[in-house]
Image (spheres, helix red, strand yellow):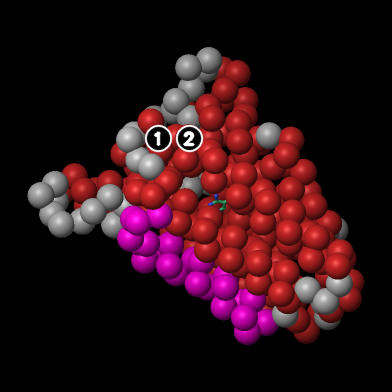
Amino acid sequence: MSVFARLKAAALDDWNSYVDHAFIRQMEDGTLPEAVFQSYLVQDYLFLIQFARANALAIYKSRTLDDMRIAQTSLNVIMNEMNLHVRLCERWGLSPADLEAAPEHRATVAYTRYVLDCGASGDLLDLHVALAPCVIGYAEIGKRLEPALLANPDHPYREWISEYASDGFQEAAQASIAHLDRLAELSLTEKRFDGLTAIFAAASRLEADFWQMGYDIADERRNHPAGIKPLGA
Ligand SMILES: Cc1ncc(CO)c(N)n1
């Protein structure tokens, strides 16, 4: 059993609150309100900027070139992934500069800074466990939602789903799973497993909160249209 499979089994409720969130179900059947998706996607751009930093931290925390290359590849995947956000946001009239200028929502701050702190205070295994729900979870979601594209040729979230179902993204997730096993061989003891599970569970819950944030921002904007909240706030 892979370390990832063990972590997932040990934190299954938290994991499911993330990959089986209402946001994902509504995305799958195409009923997710566009305002919710837009609010999410702007924050996700800000999230990816911080995740790029977390992968850069993984390079810094690496003692071997192999570990550095793995983190470098993840950094490239993130930089590529941001093209999706730029392309989709362009259609709403939002430039990359607009996105970068949007204020970070507290759910974005909570998740990204939590992961960065796991890396700052822990070792490379702690950091990769904190990063694991990100790539591996989105790959799982992409695969699960892919059949919905066949069922509906006009699926409103085709590009998003295709990105995460793509071979490139799936391979990145497989590489993360394999890398966790290699790191664990070197430094995972049974004593450490509970602590790693706590990190994995917390990151999974923060992912669930991230979907929820899309609804919360859209609600706030609807209820306070004249409010001072700028886009993405
Ligand atoms: C919040 C979040 N988690 C994971 C991914 C996948 O990279 C993403 N784009 N955003």
Provide the secondary structure element on which disc 2 rests: helix
Amino acid marked by disc 1: Glu
Which of 97/82 is in front?
A: 97
Residue drawn at the location 38% of the way across and 42% of the way down: 95
Where does residue 216 sit, x and y in percent of width and height? 30, 53
Provide the secondary structure element on which disc 1 rests: helix
Give the magenta range: 100-122
Amino acid marked by disc 2: Arg
Q: Viewed as shown, does residue 130 lie left or right of 85? A: right
Where does residue 65 sit, x and y in percent of width and height? 86, 67
Residue drawn at the location 80% of the way across and 52% of the way down: 175
Residue 87, which numbered label?
Answer: 2
* Residue 112 belongs to the span the image colors magenta: yes
Which quarter of the figure has residue 199? bottom right
Magenta stretch, overall SS:
helix
Q: Find disc 1 in the rendering and name its residue.
A: 90
Mark 2 neighbour class, 10 Å CA radius: few under 14, some 14 to 19, many 20 or more? some
